[in-house]
Structures are given as structure tokens and as C-alpha cells.
Image (cartoon, rainbow, N blue to C red):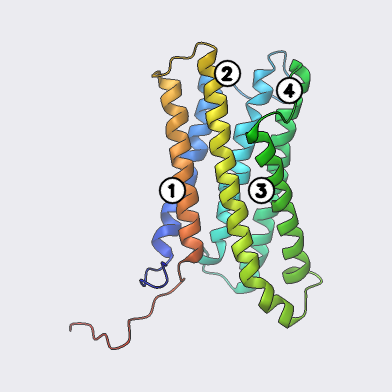
Amino acid sequence: MAGQIGVAAAPFTFVSHVLGVVAAVLVLFWCIHFRGGLAFEAVNKNLIFNLHPVFMLIGFIVIGGEAIISYKSLPLSKEVKKLIHLILHATAIVLGIVGIWAAFKFHNDSGIVNLYSLHSWVGIGTISLYGIQWIYGFLTFFYPGGAAGLRRSSLPWHVLFGLFVYVLAVATAELGFLEKLTFLQSGGLAKYGSEAFLVNFTALVVILFGAFVVISAVAPAHVEDPRGYVPIA
């Protein structure tokens, strides 16, 4: 749609960068200021859980989003952008795995069962699809690389499936914010307090970030003047 109305990707990628930074700062502020900090090992098991939203949002959502728009936002050669795209997605997967490990460790150390919520089901499915997408992309477009015809026919599906998985990742994050805030409010957190406001606002920023990433991906890198259009001198 963006291409049909002649809107270039550049302004959307710029807004995506800004929203990504804002989302990262907000989730760090929430987990450190309101939730007490971060730790891989701690007597207070909540500090271990705090790694989960930080790694999932900054790694899986923000870095994953930057990987998607790298083709549109970087003034580099196609081969260099392909390598950056590949590395950023790999980084997102690794950080996502660490984030999931933190959730499992928190549950296991606290005597809480695993994989009981819609958030966890969709999350496991999403990172599995993300990994499959990365492996297929690596083998087809990077090394050893498929035949020219295979790459050409696979590219539209690779882009479409990648955006589908990314939208799933954003939706999973929203389910996570909702689930955690519901637990906190059930435990006495003020429904209209500053922490609840921060969590909801962070979730809104993530939605906007995901939307601008998708728009950036589908918008053309450059826009030509419409046929027959003559600019006013």
C-alpha cells in the first residue's frame, strides 16, 4: 500500500529507530527502577525473571525489527546489508533464547509450572518459526545458496513469512505485558499507579514500533515521480 501511494521508507525507518530506543529505555527503567534489577542468579527470583522482558524486547523485538529494516535504512551495498540482516536476526534469536531461559529458570526455581499460558504457547511457537525462517534464509540466500530461480521464487515468501513471524513476536510481547501486569495487579499493584502506567505505555510503544517496522519493510526505498507529473518550477 505504501508503495502504491508513493511513500518512501526513509521516514518510517527513522521513526522505527527512535521508537526502538524508547522501548528499550522504558523496559530497562521498569525492570531496574520498579522491579529491583536484573540477575542471572539471585535469592530474589524476581530479578531472574526481569531478564525475560529485557532480553525479549531489546533482543527479539527491537534488534529483530532493526534486522528487518536494515535493507531500507542502511546506505550500503546489497551484500553488506544481507550480512548485517543475517547477523542481527541471529543476535535476536540468541537473545530471545536467553530471555526464554530466564523465564524457565524463574519458574523452576520458584516451583511454578511452565508453558501454561497463551503467552508461553505463542512465544515458543514464534521463536521456533523465527529459527526456521533464519535457517532457510541462511541456506537459500547466504550459504551455500540456492539456485537463482529458487532464490527469486523464495524471496517474496521469505519476506512475507518473516513479517508474519515478526507480527507474531509483537503480539506475544503484548500478551506478556498483559499477563505480567495482571499478576502484579492481582498482588496489590495499584491499577492507576505509575508502574501500571509505565507498563501500558511501553506496550503501546512496542505496538507502534512493530507497525513502523512493517510499514518500512513494505514501503519502497525510493519513489519516482508519478508518470505525467511535472513539478512546478
Give x and y (percent) for residue 119: 63, 35
Estimate the x, y position of residue 6 in percent, counting from the top left. 36, 72
In the rendered image, the residue lying farthest to the right is: 144
Mark 3 residue type = Ala
Q: Residue at x 45, y 54 (%)?
A: 212
Viewer-closest of 104 and 48: 104
2 and 4 marks in contact (CB < 8 Å) = no
**Mark drawn on residue 107:** 4
Amino acid tagged 4: His
Q: Secondary structure at mark 4?
A: helix
Residue lying farthest to the bottom in this orientation: 228
Q: Quadrant of the N terminus?
A: bottom left
Residue type at the position of mark 1: Val
**Quick check: 8 left or right of 102?**
left
Rendered position, 202 above or below 163 = above
- The structure residue drawn at horizontal position 38% and vertical position 80%, both measured from the top left corner, is 224
As measured in the structure, the alpha-carbon distance from the residue carrying label 4 to the one carrying label 3 is: 23 Å
Instruction: Give yes or no for contact between labels 1 and 4 (Cβ–Cβ under 8 Å).
Output: no
Q: Sequence order check: which comes first, mark 1 or mark 4?
A: 1
CA gap between label 1 and label 4 equals 34 Å
Query: Residue at label 3?
Result: 92
Residue 67 visible, this angle = no
Q: On the picture, is 83 further left or further right than 164?
A: right
Residue occupied by mark 2: 36
